[in-house]
Image: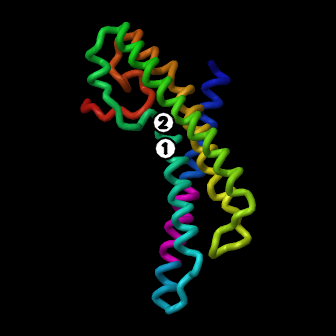
Amino acid sequence: MGLVHGARRALEFGLIVISLLLMTSLAVLVVAAVGFRSAGASLTWYDEVASVMLAWITYYGAALAALRRAHLGFPNLVAALPRSLRLLALAISETAIITFFALAAYFGLQVLDLLRGDTLISLPWVRVEFTQSVIPIGAALFIVAELFTIPDKVQEILSNKAPGELGHGVDASPR
């Protein structure tokens, strides 16, 4: 489990760094764009780049949230089920999540193929394939994050612990 735990920590660190860099860059871009616009010299590429950055923050942040088990869920509903049904609910939900993101990754790759050669309108040297690569990459990262968290979820069910009691993920319950 040491190798798996190390890989999980490395992925978490990487996603944190990417998310922080994207959020900081977007904040700087917004402030700069406001300054330029106030000076009467709007940045022609601002809207296009800011929307791409926001999409990237969403995808990478979602993968980080999945890895930290911080997405919204129904832990009390699942916890009320008998253990065997909790395992079944976990299997069904993980299968659905992984299937959805596998399809998103597959069709994201298809979209990249269709967009081959297209560029951003305001920055013709930036290929749309690059900006939209976040779809299959983010979907794959989400799948990896889910796979990393399945053992923790199974352990919680088998040990009759409430979600978050094992010290993994986000636990919003009062102490």
| Residue type of the residue flagged with mark 1 | Ala
| Disc 2 residue type (three-letter) | Ala
Disc marking residue 62: 1
Give the SS element for disc 1: helix
Q: Is residue 151 above or below residue 118?
A: above
Point 48% across, 24% down: residue: 94
Q: Nearer the viewer, residue 11 or 118?
A: 118
Q: Position of residue 131 (x, y in %)?
A: 64, 58
Eyeballing the image, is 20 above or below 120?
above
Mark 1 and mark 2 in contact (Cβ < 8 Å)?
A: yes
Q: Is residue 76 left or right of residue 158?
A: left
Lateral position of residue 38 relative to residue 133, left or right = left
Residue marked by disc 2: 66
Question: Circle 2 — which element?
Answer: helix
Local packing at callout 2 (Cα closer than 10 Å; few below 14, some 14-19, many 20+) is: many
Locate the C terminus by quadrant.
top left
| Residue 163: quarter of image | top left
Badge 1, how many Cα within 10 Å: few under 14, some, many 20+? many
Of residue 124 and residue 159, the one placed in the foreground of this image is 124
Looking at the image, residue 51 lies above or below residue 74: below
- In the picture, measured across the screen, residue 29 lies left or right of residue 109, that is left
Give the spatial CA distance, label 2 vs label 1: 6 Å
Quadrant of the rendered image containing residue 53: bottom right
The residue at 50%/59% (across/down) is: 54
Q: Which residues are magenta?
A: 20-32
